[in-house]
Image: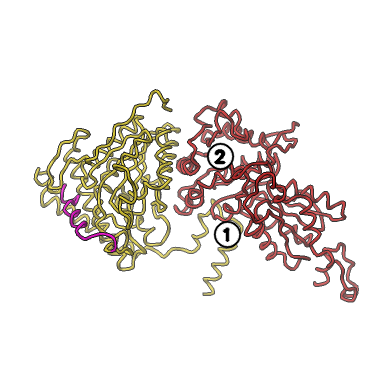
Chain colours: A red, B yellow
Amino acid sequence: MAEITMAQALNRALRDALHDDPNVVVYGEDVGPLGGVFRVTDGLTAQFGEDRCFDSPLAESGIVGTAVGMASYGLRPVVEMQFDAFGYPAFEQVVSHVAKMRNRTRGRMSLPLVIRIPYGGGIGGVEHHSDSSEAYYAHTPGLRVITPGTPSDAYSMLREAIACPDPVVFLEPKRRYWAKEEVETPVRTAPMDRAVVRRTGSDVTLIAYGPMVATALEAAEAAREEGRDVEVVDLRSLAPFDDATVTASVRKTGRALVVHEAATFAGYGAEVAARVTERCFHYLEAPVLRVGGLDIPYPPPRLEHHHLPDVDRILDAIARLQWEADWVDPDAVPSGARPPASGARRGREVRS
Amino acid sequence: MKRLDDRIAPPLPTLEPIRLVDRHGRRVADPTVSCPSPTTLTSLLRAMIVGRRFDRQAGALARQGRLAVYPSSYGQEACQVAGVLALAEQDWLFPTYRDSVALVTRGVDPVETLTLLRGDWHSGYDPGLHRCAPQCTPLATNASHAVGLTYAARHKGEDVAALVLMGDGATSEGDAHEAYNFAAVWNTPVVFLVQNNGWAISVPLHRQSAAPTLAHKAVGYGMRGYHVDGNDAAAVHAVVGRALEEARAGGGPAIVEARTYRLDAHTNADAPQRYRDDSEVEYWKQRDPIERLETLLRAEGHVDDDTLAGFAAEAERMAADVRERVDAAPDPDPDELFAHVYAAPTAQLVEQRQALRDEIREG
């Protein structure tokens, strides 16, 4: 098995989709002969011709708007917004047409299209090249919003997105483009609308997605050295949300922490925290905490490390999850109760 | 894709609009286009008469509260009808909320046309059936859809052109610019018919654009632009027909600016006396598109009282049918709110649908 990067995995997914389905077309800014600024479309024009992978005028609303027209006539366009913040001119098309066309037409006109957006920071990009725009899209009913955290997921989820009858906003964590994994393509991972448990643990659930999955796993490893057994859930799909997987994990561990790069205020983590609280309240030992970016416009590259959540910030947050509540008054334990298996479960059993 | 050295600057549109029938119903010769046949002119007249009756009926339903709102195209019938009748069967129409008459002309069920404005659903007709996109409210945003659709058709080897209806105000939108540019660069067969009625709700044209005519905008994109008398159905039909023909033959897209006037308010909720003078409305009533064509066809003996009585009777039957069926339309089903958000409802939507059902049942 060979090691490939996430960018290569995405490239292979596009290549295989173009090969398997003549209705797939790939276009956007610089995706033709250049192969995209991140080389995700490298070699596709040479292999499939200018009819299948081509450069468009530099206008994001036009790119998405034309994709709406193509998808309504049976093509499966895969368009690229070159960077997160360059996708904003297309916002009206996305929220007013892409997300709503099926609903407006009572299911008679569907839009099987994919909008690929490299997003997030951590690559030293100057202004407008590092936004985490996921909440804007996830808030819009009618869109599927997914984001892979590994090369194998990148391949599998992009293939599934292109085959999906619903429009998909496909967020690519650009700082993980060069992350490697041994993968044999084609590869099929879990369905794209499911969260997966990346690492099992019993003390606390770290909920992460996209660029933060690797950081969460590193933090989990570091926490083990501090005696905490951390479970990591990779959401993968931001919309729809996989309540079942997340709820099962948090009910098991009793503590939850959401991690993302985006500004914390009104960020995606707020939705996760609310859903977890609504479904797991009686299982929780501590409030659900959020570890996100600062509530500031994305900083200049020389300061971005202060903004982005890292292992230390996650460990600090884990430490704030009220572990002192492990202590339970022995008199409060009903006689004959089974000795609790872990601190996290203790309070629950006492209450039950 | 055209290379730079192959490009020829398109001719400038004329400042004086192309006209084939003047306001007194007399033929005028034009060097650009020839007049459609009497048979075509008669079908234009018939469609305008039926269209105006539909428009008047819908306006009445709005005033009675039986429609949520109705944006009238009274006075713009030549644009509504003649552009649509220039389309081939396989072509697509991209209308706005003001283009209900165009949809009825295309063959869409008048009651299904009013689904949006009655507030039952966002669009009532099957777009594929008559090749009409849903009526678009955010201005100019459906123009790029037409570009993409015709691109897709060409990709599949099909001969499909599209007619985008837009107003003068919409040409100020960034999406109009992007659609014009994509259409021109991709050389897709799209005709953008700009119904310049002089007013974007309350804002007059001179606050909207400093272009000599809106058709001049085409030139900067490498497109052809035509400036036509929008109350002359013969001229609109001939010019849109020519533009479609050129576009199909690979000559590229075009902007057709049709100078017309909205005789009614923007919608039943508008107050036009706040921004325009009655004398202006009177001026345009003298240039009525229906009277003009009727005068010509009568004078030349192509229609008579019987023909016109037949058209009027047809219009009345349609209006009666609309009145009857609009009221008979079933109440919208709350369950449907969840049915079309995704191809299959998500777990969350299934949950919310059940919660709403319970809420309704418990009153």
Assess disc 2: are there few (<14), some (14-19) or many (≥20) residues with their C-alpha within 10 Å of its C-alpha.
many
**Residue kind at label 1, given as amino acid type:** Leu
Asked whether A43 or B47 is in front, the reply is A43
Q: In which quarter of the image is the N terminus of chain B?
A: top left
Q: Which chain carries label 1?
A: B
Image quadrant assignment for residue A155: top right
Asked whether A293 or B63 is in front, the reply is A293
> Which region shows up in magenta?
B274-293
Above/below status of B88 relative to B78: above
Q: Which chain carries label 2?
A: A
Give the farthest residue toward the top: B5
Horizontal placement of B163 versus A13: left or right?
left
The reply to whether residue A24 is in sight is no
Residue B355: where, in percent of width, then height?
Answer: 57, 67
Q: Name the residue under label 2.
A: A80
Q: Mark 1 points at which residue?
A: B349
Horizontal placement of A272 versus B342: left or right?
right
**Residue occupying image coordinates x 30% and y 53%:** B204
Separation of marks 1 and 2 at Cα, in angstroms: 29 Å
Give the dominant element type of the magenta stretch: helix, strand or loop: helix
Residue B301: where, in percent of width, then height?
Answer: 9, 44
Question: Which one is closest to the eye, mark 1 or mark 2?
Answer: 2
Assess disc 1: are there few (<14), some (14-19) or many (≥20) residues with their C-alpha within 10 Å of its C-alpha.
some
The reply to whether residue B250 is in sight is yes
Residue A277: where, in percent of width, then height?
Answer: 70, 65
Q: Is residue A349 magenta?
A: no
**Residue occupying image coordinates x 65% and y 60%:** A270
**Residue occupying image coordinates x 69% and y 52%:** A260
Considering the numbered disc 1 on the image, is that residue within a helix, a strand or a loop?
helix
